[in-house]
Image: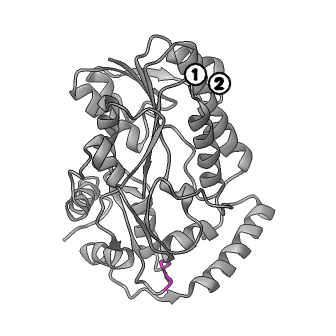
Amino acid sequence: MKILVTGGTGFLGRRLVSALLDRGHQVYMMGRNFSRVQELMRDGAIPVACDLRDHEAVLAACAGMNTVYHVAALVKPWGNWADFFEINVDGTAAVLEGCRKHSIRRCIYVSTSSVTFNGQNQHNIAESTPYARCFSSPYTRSKYEAEKLVKAASDVRTVIIRPHIIFGPGDRWLPRMLEYARQQRLYQIGNGRNRSDVTYVDNVVHALLLALYAQNVNGKTYIITNDEHVVLWNTLRVILQRLKLSEPLHMIPLPFALMLATAMERRANWMGTNPILTRYTATMLACTQTYDISAARKDLAYEPVVSVSEGIDRTLDSLKLHRRWTIY
């Protein structure tokens, strides 16, 4: 197939492009900075320089494609709503319009499980769980708005994939946490007993590939995780110990963390900076968030191919290879 991957130069997009090339597809890799994907280009990936805010360019990029993977998004815990709207919502609208205009066979949209996160403990959440009533993060609000567009596009054959906390070599989330720990600025938020589903990046890629070939999935949504329900702070402590960063983590009660985050967000709005802690991050780190992936198992025949433990090993090996940490 001729396949367009928006966000093909990003963390998840690069892995997806590589997997599609391995399966013999002709892959068009949309992005803005191709300096990190030279190897993929040597392997045959075709670069498409395009910003999601340039709707005419997006429509042109869709021409002649059989399938579009819409992976690109502005992913940050904080920022201006206008930026999130232009990229994540209007950009998605442009991709859907490109699919309509060029009669593309399937559009697979990468969303986030956080669209149903209400800032409280949630157990075994399924696709049928209602959206959150309000969002403490412009990112999750924008993904909710984009999902509504995808679901409303009845004239486009769509599939929505909702991963939860993607990690792996090249991610930004884990290195940021490790840097806070190195600076002795990482605090345990909440009682530390909360469980969470994390998802190794290759498992998300596996689900995206299954969605390409699956039958009778048009218009459906699938949650993708490792399905291991790990105790989040215990997992982080294991990683810190492996990196000799096992300083005791002082605990901050969630209500106090939310007060701090609110103050930091207000100051950030006033100063035009980024807060160290946001309400969204505080609740994500303190609350239980486990998910039910039975729909993906049934319709996509999805099963995680890499465990959390193996995924951590691969991620730490990658950090060691790039000399970012000394791993023992």
Residue at left 32%, top 42%? 299
Circles 1, 2 touching at the beta carbon (< 8 Å): yes
Q: Kindly report the distance in space between the C-alpha atoms of the residues bearing marks 1 and 2.
A: 6 Å
Asked if residue 202 is positioned above or below residue 235 in the image, the reply reads: above
Q: Quadrant of the N terminus?
A: top left
Left or right side of 256 for 41: left
> Mark 2 = which residue?
54
Magenta stretch, main secondary structure class: loop
Quarter of the view holding residue 261: bottom right
Residue 39 visible from this viewpoint: no
> Which residues fall within the magenta stretch?
185-190
Q: Is residue 187 magenta?
A: yes
Type of the residue with mark 2: Asp
Q: Residues within 10 Å of mark 1 (few under 14, many from 20)?
A: many
> Mark 1 = which residue?
58
> Residue 133: percent from the left, percent from the top?
67, 61
> Residue 117: percent from the left, percent from the top?
55, 63
